[in-house]
Amino acid sequence: MSVVVEREFEFTQQDFSMLAELVTKHAGIIVMPEKFDMFYSRLARRVRALNLANFKQYCDLLSAGNEEEFHHFINAITTNLTSFFREIHHFDYLKSTIIPGLIKKNASSKKIRIWSAGCSTGEEPYTLAITLKEALSADPNWDVKILATDIDSNVLETASAGLYKEDRIAGLSQDQKSKWFKRGKGANEGMVAVSQELKDLISFKRLNLMESPWPLKGPFDVIFCRNVIIYFDRETKEKLVERYTDLLSEEGHVIIGHSESLNKANARLKLLGNTVYQKIH
Ligand SMILES: C[S@@+](CC[C@H](N)C(=O)[O-])C[C@H]1O[C@@H](n2cnc3c(N)ncnc32)[C@H](O)[C@@H]1O
């Protein structure tokens, strides 16, 4: 027996296909058919806010080139799951191996440049900042900059504010909590604010990775692009990784998520293990 779902707004397969195509074309994100309900629930809010009668009208609005709504549309569709010290082995490796290597390699410039591409609400770049601060504590004169980018302007607002529910940092050591976060008071009770010292290392910018050229200059010593390319098709992924490699410094590293792979796509990168890749030429 098939179940008929009562919906507030009519949403047809044709509407879904049109919206899915738009997302793929603009953001590179491949949309599987099982995302039908997710599209409905995330976008019904927009249809309601705009006082539209159905999804067909919403599709028409986007097709007509309404830029402001397109922006809301992309923000609603991205998947932003993240956490502090997610896949902690990457930060352990950065601290134990990559940074000591950079301390030697970049001894004369004393610069380290890192890019968190697809940074979501900021937990990844703040974790990078903590890791760098800890690894460089013996010599605070290093010039460290972290670029953190995402296509979604909502997550970037959260990231720049650096204000999180206290349970988000439950996994950090007591020392890390007291050193890098301040407990919120009054209206911010139950929240923690990231220290200014960490914030000062990071620039948050809106960037669609599908854009070309990118309005940024390398080289980067390390590029974190974790749990982003999983949503892209093979060709898009390969092109993106080529562009990352172009922007890497000599022997620089690209780090992707544990469930992602580069399928030996790039002859200039060597897999070191645990989805950490190094530029070889
Ligand atoms: C699942 S989150 C990953 C966050 C973080 N890197 C991590 O691993 O915890 C994926 C992020 O990639 C962003 N994203 C998806 N497509 C993008 C694109 N074309 N350009 C830039 N960012 C994109 C999404 O907005 C989302 O915030």
Image: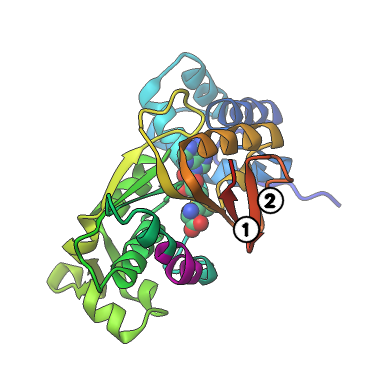
Residue extending furthest bottom?
174
Residue extending furthest left?
186
In the rendered image, which residue does mark 1 sit on? 275
- Residue at 26 percent across and 75 percent down: it is 190
Amino acid on which disc 2 is placed: Ser
Q: Is residue 154 left or right of residue 138?
A: right
Residue extending furthest right?
1
- The answer to the question of whether label 1 and label 2 lie on touching residues, with beta carbons closer than 8 A, is yes
Circle 2 — which element? loop
In the rendered image, which residue does mark 2 sit on? 261
Question: Which disc is residue 150 wearing?
Answer: none
Whole-percent x and y of residue 109? 27, 49
Residue 94 magenta-drawn?
yes
- Residue at 34 percent across and 70 percent down: it is 135
Circle 1 — which element? loop
Q: Magenta residues?
A: 91-100
Q: Residues within 10 Å of mark 1 (few under 14, many from 20)?
A: some
Whole-percent x and y of residue 266? 67, 39
Viewer-nearest residue: 262 or 111: 111
Is residue 43 among the parts visible in the rendering? no
Amino acid on which disc 1 is placed: Thr
Viewer-nearest residue: 47 or 167: 167
Q: Residues within 10 Å of mark 2 (few under 14, many from 20)?
A: some
Is most of the magenta stretch helix, strand or loop? helix
